[in-house]
Each structure stands twice: as C-alpha cells, then as structure tokens.
Amino acid sequence: MTATMKDKIGTLLILSTALLFFSPEKVMTATEPPVVEELRPAGAAVNDRFGQSVSLSSDIGVFGAPGTARNGTESGAVHVFSRSGNSWQQKDMLVPDDGMAGDAFGGSVSISGDTIVIGAAGEDDQGAESGAVYVFGRSGTDWVQQAKLVADDGAAGDGFGFDVAIDGDVVVVGAPFDDGNGSVYTFIRSAGTWEKQSKLLAYGGGVAGDRFGCSVDIAYDTIIIGADGDDNTATDDGSAFIYTPYGSGWRYQRKITAGDASEGDRFGWSVAMGLETALVGTNRAQNESASRQGAAYVFARQAGGTWTEQQRFAGSSQGTDDGFGFHVALYDNFFLIGAPRESIDGINAGAVYVFSRAESDPWPLHAKYPGSISGSGFGTQAAVFGDTVIAGAPGQGEGSAYAFMYPGSLGLYLPSHDWRMISRPCYNTNPASTLFGDDIEAGIYAKTWTMYRIEPEKATRANPYGYFQLQATEPLAEGVGYWIYSVKDGILDVQGLPTPIHDSNECPSVNGCAEAPLAWLSSGVVSRNNQVGNPLPFAVDWADVIVVVTPGDGSAPVALTPSEAYAKKFMRNTFYRYENKKYSPASDITPGMRGTIRPFESVWVHTLDPQHHAFPASAIKLLFPVPGL
C-alpha cells in the first residue's frame, strides 16, 4: 500500500497548551528520579510542531519545528538548546538560506559533534516535494549553514530528507518515494566539503509502496534502513536492511524481519543502530489484547554478519492504536521506545518507555514516562545520550519537548562473566567495594566480583602486563581506568554532581574539566598503554577531549586535539574500548570511527616514544570537558 509523505511529517491530533507532568512508572535500578524540564522556543506559534523531530549529543539538543511559518506556511525551523547543569537554554533558531512555504524544514534532524543535518522533504528544487537536506556546523557559539544536499537524480515526490542520520563525517538520507519504492543516499565529508558517496537500493529490488528509506540510522560503521511497506509474508508487514562499508561505499549485509510478522505491521517504521545491536519499531503491530498497539524488536549481530531476533517489546497499556514503536532510539545499553498515541492519562497523550539491558531478564523496563495531556503526542520522537533523555510532544499548541536529567547517569552496563573497563566517578572517593558493590546483586568482593588496576612499570615475568587486584578498601584514583569482573550482571549508576572539577586555561568548558593523567615509558619504547577513565556522568566525544602537554623548558602548557597530539608524536589519536569480548578503535577525525567515551567508562590510550616528540615534554594529561560549553 502506498503511503504519503504527510504520514510522518504532519498530523498530530488534538492541540493543547497545558503542561505535561511526569512520574516514572517503574524504575529497575536504584537510579534516583530524574530532574524534568520543559523546553519551548521563544516566539513559537500554534501548529509549529516543535518537537516533531529531536536529536541529542552531549549537551546540545536539536528540535525540529517543521510547521513554523518563518519563510511561509510550513517552511519550518530548527531550534538548538544547550544544557548547563540541569538547565537548558535556547541558543539558536536555524532556517535555510532558501527556505520557502511547504519545505517542512526540520521534519527530521540528527546531530553528531559539531554538525547538524536537517531534512526538508517538502523542498521543491527538483520538483514538488523532491526534498533537500541542509548541513549546519558550529562556529564559536553560532550555528551556520555549511551545505545543501540534494539527490543528483532527484525528481518530484521523492521525499529526499524524509529521515536523516549522521555519524562523524557520514550522512545518510532517506528518500522513501523515489521511483515509487524508495532509496537512500550517503554523503561523506572530505576536507570540509560534502560529496555524494553512494545510492542504496533495497537488496533484490523493490516494488511501489515499499518506502525503503522511511527511516535510517548509522552507528559503528553500520547503516540500518527501514522499509515499512515491504511485503514479505503479508502486505505491508515491513522489513529493515543492514549495510556495512565496502571499498569506498556500502554493501548489503542482511535483511531483517519480525518473527511474528502480520499484515499491516509496518516493521521498519522506525530504526536505531548500536554496537552489534539493532532496534526496529513496527508502530502498527497486532498484540494479543490490543489491535494495532505497536511493537519493537531488538536484534543482535552474530559472527558472519547474521542478525538474530533477541526480544519483542510491547507497551504496558495494551491499548488499541497506541503507536508503540512510532520512534525508537538507543544509547549504550538503553533503549527508548515512543508511543505517542497511548491514552492512559489522556486521549493520545503518549508515553516514552526506557528499557535497560540485564541478562537475568533481557531488556526489562527501566522507566516509563506517560504524558497527561490529550493530543500532545508525547513520544513522537525521543533521544538519549549520557545521563539525559529528551522527548518531543509536537501536538500541544506550538509543540514542546521535555528533558529528563538523571542526577548521576543512566548507568554503565556490566555484563556477567565478562570484563568491563570502568572509571572512578570524579566526585567520589569511596573504595571500590563501597562504590560499586550495591550495583551488583548479591555481590561479595573477591568472590563474585573483583577489580584490577594496571601498572606497566611494575610488570614482571610472572605478571608481564602489570595487573594487580585491588583490595576491597582501596580508594580509586580520578581519571585512572580499572577492570571489573562479575559473575552477575548489573548497571553501575553512581549518583551525584561531578566534583572536584579542574578549571585551567586549557579547559574549553565554563563548567570546568575532569583530568586523566597519562605517562610515557622510557625513551626507545614505541608506545605505552594508558588505561584512562571518563570520571563524568556524561558521555564525552573523543574529538572534544583536550590533550595538555607541559613543555620541559617550563613554558606554558600546550592544548591539542588528539590528532594534533598524534601529529606531534606525543600520543596516538585513537582510543580502544573493550566490549563484547573484543577491542574496537575510535578516532577523532576518521570518517565512521568517531566515538564517545561513555560515563564511568575507561579506554586504552597509547602515548609514544619520547625521543620522537615534537619538543621535549615533562608531562601529558587529558581533559574531559563538563557539558556547558
């Protein structure tokens, strides 16, 4: 069945200007209730649909308002908010240089680091609703338009920009109505210029109404594409396609479908990609006690590139047409699922569900936030990053959004019978057993769980890597990484404010930085492994980490990016994390490899041979900026 562009970019129910009120329905861990703040842009008007699309990276929230009439009816706008502490302030309103009525600019948004991509699927340059995508970059405290992307074979009705995603220097754009069945375009940034990389089509072809590209996401060098109108075992049961890098482009890896697919489910309406994990929403799936309530499915990548279904999620309300799965998002080991038409506390008031991973009960409900105002559409889109969840409610008046800020963090997942690299929270001086013991069920230190530190200088033939088990009462050092092992799984969710924080000339954040010391081995040793930890309850982009080198002549310290430090032979510009029983690298500049260091996570950083340094240096350390730039 063919669906139109307005299926996602328009209608949202009954309007209201009242506020929403939230109370977590269930919390799995000991995490304290979050601080909640409502976000509304200055000068907003009824039907702006602020919150129709949302995206989050570190301390920056991006909110689309495609109904805004800045350059004509429904020309659209995007609002940028910045967080400082538990407060959010509007920083900018973005509109395109050539905006016109009907563009629906802001119908889709995505942010990665200092780059925002914005879809305008109603833009008419190559014919009515051919579509376009705009790229904005941060320049100081402002956001400026850097590029406009269009399909080189665009035509009327393509809907290019219906959904967008960015990861580092790669942008993915859905055009679900191209040639009737849909397509996806990828663009890559090279030397500051965006160029088309490839055009992806559904593997095996497609037919009219497939809507290949109705949803897209990219993470960890993997693209997932929804085709919710694809006919597999029934009409419009839907599918999703996985693509991985190949040469200078991308190649098909796998098609995934729901194990219990039925007619009209629209599996692939929403998609999200994580590390070896994919989340797919259906929006219209049938459940035993409710017609078309919706559902979401999690898949895990196996050896050889196969994907297996791990779990099916359904909403707790069991209401008809809840829209559960209308939007999905994931971060680390937390899933968000929106149900914008759920009607527990008001007709179509909506809800957002947060699930967290736990092996004893796969992906149990961590928290649920129900809307309370009829027609608000709360949960139309949502995003999670670090200690923050944001969600849009575009159906109430001009629209609004809400930020849920946990006083520590959502937590770091600790798998059972496996190792994890962790960090001491910078605001806590408690010993290991006190700090993390309550997060591990029935934990007995040195019996069911334990921690190790590494000291390469103390390595011996019997202990060649220099690993030493911590005593239960041993305090942890700030910025230093540790290994933890447990026979039980859990979520490390230490609470509190990030203090002490160091304020120096090299720190770019008004809220200060956390420090992590690095060390070199003696001259002639190629590299030294440093296990450094992010002590903040916030994820930090590796590209935002500052490398501070103190010259040996006593002159002022030098602040560098990881790549600048690598060019001067002080350290490599990649870090390595251990997860799923293997190491994976991340860089601050390599396309597809840009990464973040999670809250309370530690990673490997390699310092280089002192005899090759650009200048003699006496010390080196990393600064992790606290959000609030």
Image (cartoon, helix red, strand yellow):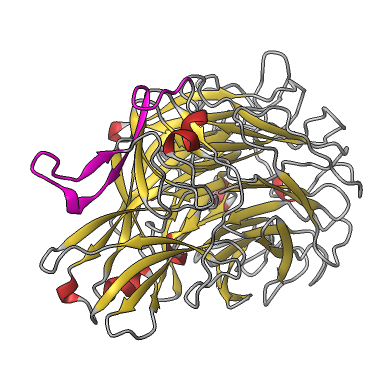
Image check: 45 left or right of 219? right
Q: Is residue 466 magenta?
A: yes
The location of residue 106, given as percent across then percent down, is 69, 60
Question: Picture quarter containing residue 30?
Answer: top right
- Residue for point 61% across, 51% down: 497
Q: Is residue 109 visible?
A: yes
- Name the one closer to the observer, 474 or 311: 474
The location of residue 288, given as percent across then percent down, is 67, 13
Question: Picture quarter containing residue 242?
Answer: top left
The location of residue 538, given as percent across then percent down, is 54, 52
Q: Is residue 172 visible?
A: no
The location of residue 29, given as percent across then percent down, is 59, 30
Image check: 378 left or right of 54? right
Image check: 312 left or right of 318? left
Q: Is residue 629 magenta?
A: no
- Residue for point 35% across, 63% down: 590
- Residue for point 72% across, 14% down: 289
- Name the one closer to the observer, 572 or 493: 493
Where 10 sits versus 276, above or below? below
Q: Which residues are magenta?
A: 442-469
Q: How many marks?
A: 0
